[in-house]
Image (tube, rainbow, N blue to C red):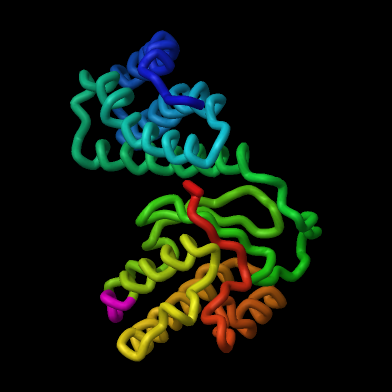
Amino acid sequence: MNEITKQTDLGTLAERSRIAAKYLNQMVSCGNVSERRQLLRSLTQELFDSCATPHLELVRTRQDVVQFDNTMGSYFSLLICPLMADLRLSKKEQALLLTCARLRQRKWIADALERIQPKSDQPKRAAGRVRTWNDLEISVLDEDRLCYRFDGSGFTVVNCADMGFADGRKRPTEHKRAWGLLVKIAANNGRLPIAEITLQNKSSIQTDIAVIRDSLRLHFTKSASSETVSNLKSVDPLPFRRREGYKTLFKITLANR
């Protein structure tokens, strides 16, 4: 994909107009708040998908994924909202639609990554098998989001807050700094060389590494089997290796590399 052009968007204009007309006619006569909101969700989802579908077909490389992601960021304000201008949406409804659009963006970026990502070297494990840190692949999308998958399965997109790094209830400074360190480790393919650890920064790095370990364990043990929980909690996902530095047991990279 050399670039995503306005012509691509214009090519789906008729389709978006058709979708909008279908739902707008229903909402005009809808007096139920709950039903109206459901119609708005469905409308936003269909409009977003009609924009994303032709763009996804142009994705070939990691750089294309980043451009696709940036382009999707403009769908809501430039392509979806204008079609709803006559609805006089409340602030709650606007927030609802923005949330819906962001969720669809997560879904499509995961599809784009799946499209260009090489098949995992490891075969998919059977359902119910115990997962290990070695089965995890992480790709950092930008300064606030990453995606991951286990055992070569489909990608899941999450943000900094989802991973527990933006929790302001306890020591928010360390959490934000720890996220930045995780991104730095991703840029170095899962490594923090010992040459980058000095007497001046050693204490802060150790603190951030502890936050990263705790956040990863907490996130990836949610809804996991008891055997997987036990395994992930008992094994250090980011161990320190003498004369080398820190090295993740899982694969982590930047999405644009």
Is 17 in front, or is 159? 159
In the image, what residue occupies the spot 28% across and 75% down?
A: 172
- Residue 165, compared with residue 44, is above or below; it is below
Residue 170 magenta: yes
Residue 129: % across, % down:
77, 66
| Image location of residue 219, percent across then percent down | 51, 69
Q: Is residue 219 left or right of residue 75?
A: right
Q: Is residue 22 visible?
A: no
Q: Can residue 180 be seen here?
A: yes
Q: Which residues are magenta?
A: 169-174
Indicate yes or no whether the magenta region holds residue 109: no
Residue 107 in the image: above or below residue 83: below
Query: Looking at the rendering, which quadrant does residue 148 occupy?
Result: bottom right
Please tell me which residue is depicted at 39% across the width and 17% down the height of the picture.
Answer: 9
Residue 31: x and y in percent read: 29, 26
What residue is drawn where x is 37% and y is 62%?
161
Would you place residue 256 above or below residue 20 in this image?
below
Residue 6 in the image: above or below residue 226: above
x, y percentage for residue 113?
56, 43
Residue displayed at 43% across by 24% down: 51
